Amino acid sequence: MSGGHESWLDWVFKFINFAVLVGILVKFAGKPLKEYFAGRHKTIKQKVEDANKALAEAEALKAEYEKKLSGLSDEIEKFKKSILEETEKEKKRILDEANQFAARIREQARLTYEQEKREIMAKIKEEIARLTMERTEGILKEKFSKADHAKMVDEFIEKLRSMN
């Protein structure tokens, strides 16, 4: 029994030695280990907080950029619409100006036509009057003799005398 008893005692001594060793370690190394692990815990905790903060900032930026990107398509559509509206306005303005210019040209052409027509008509009347006078003179020279002329002058003078 002494062999079985010794092994039990050996275990007790080993346990006591271990407990003493742990006690000594706790006594002398406990505070530095506690400070080390507390510092390590604090550092890890700070890094986790920094990482969470950076993650939150990144998510906020992501949300902001996603919002901007979603708004960008609307903004592009608005820009397209405004460009199309401006283009239509400019097109209408140019067409209105062209129509006004064409109307002025038509009016100027009508006025020029009327003026030239009056001038030509005046020239034609003048020419007709000249030709009529020449023809009348020719006919009168052929038909009336000097005696007829004298007779007409005498009749004219008689009419003047009778008027007075």
Image (cartoon, helix red, strand yellow):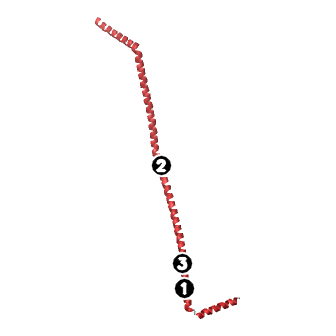
Tell me residue 125's x, y (percent).
55, 79
Who's the residue at 56% across and 92% down the image?
A: 143
Q: Which mark is residue 123?
A: 3
Badge 2 crowding class, 10 Å Cα cut-off, few under 14, some 14 to 19, many 20 or more, is few
Query: Which residue is found at the position 53% from the left and 79% from the top?
Result: 124
Label 3: how many Cα within 10 Å (few below 14, some 14–19, many 20+): few
Disc 3 marks a residue whose amino acid type is Lys
Where residue 102 sits in the image (x, y, percent)?
Answer: 50, 64
Residue under the point 52% across and 71% down: 113
Q: CA distance from mark 1 to mark 2?
A: 81 Å
In the picture of the structure, the residue carrying the numbered disc 1 is 134
Residue farthest along the bottom direction in this orientation? 147
**Lower sequence index among marks 3 and 1:** 3
Between 136 and 94, the one lying in front of the other is 136
- Residue contact at pointers 3 and 2, CB within 8 angstroms: no
Q: Which numbered mark, 1 or 2, is in the foreground of this view?
A: 1
- The Cα–Cα distance between marks 3 and 2, rounded to whole angstroms, is 65 Å
| Three-letter code for the amino acid on which mark 2 is drawn | Phe
Callout 1 amino acid: Glu
